[in-house]
Image (cartoon, helix red, strand yellow):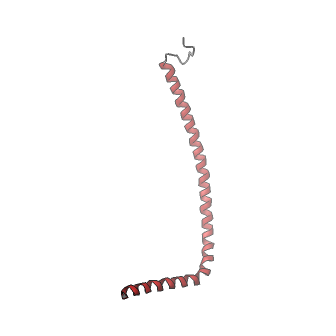
Amino acid sequence: MALFDNGLKGNVLTGLAIGIGASIFAPQVIPALAGVIKPIAKAAIKGSLVLYEKSKETVAEVGEMMEDIVAEVKAEMAESHEQSAGINPEDKTGA
């Protein structure tokens, strides 16, 4: 039991020392960190917004390409269907 009690005392004392140290140095450290972190955060947000706008443009372009491909496939299918039905694509009268 003595070993267990000593282990807890060491952990409690270490935690207490860290807490006291943090409370003493926090008023000086936090403003210094804020001065460094704010520009980094702004740059990260700006980069994210630029990436978002670029990805929106890319998705729109891919959507247009897919629409074109679908239209081409539909035209090819219609042509194939007309040929299999015996209709000459140049002569749509069926005669």
Q: Is residue 6 left or right of residue 90?
A: left
Using the image, determine if residue 50 lies above or below residue 19: above
Whole-percent x, y for residue 80 in the image:
49, 23
Q: Quadrant of the C terminus?
A: top right
Using the image, determine if residue 16 lies above or below residue 58: below
Whole-percent x, y for residue 32 in the image:
61, 76
Farthest-out residue, front: 1
Query: What residue do we see at 53% from left, 82% from top?
Result: 19
Q: Quadrant of residue 8?
A: bottom left
Farthest-out residue, top: 95
Q: Quadrant of residue 62?
A: top right
Query: What residue do we see at 60% from left, 66% from top?
Result: 40
Q: How many marks?
A: 0
Q: Quadrant of the N terminus?
A: bottom left
Q: Is residue 58 left or right of residue 3?
A: right
Whole-percent x, y for residue 4 in the image:
38, 84
Whole-percent x, y for residue 37 in the image:
60, 70
Query: What residue do we see at 59% from left, 57% from top?
Result: 48
Using the image, determine if residue 35 lies above or below residue 66: below
Using the image, determine if residue 56 lies above or below residue 39: above
Q: Is residue 80 left or right of residue 25?
A: left
Query: What residue do we see at 57% from left, 35% from top?
Result: 68
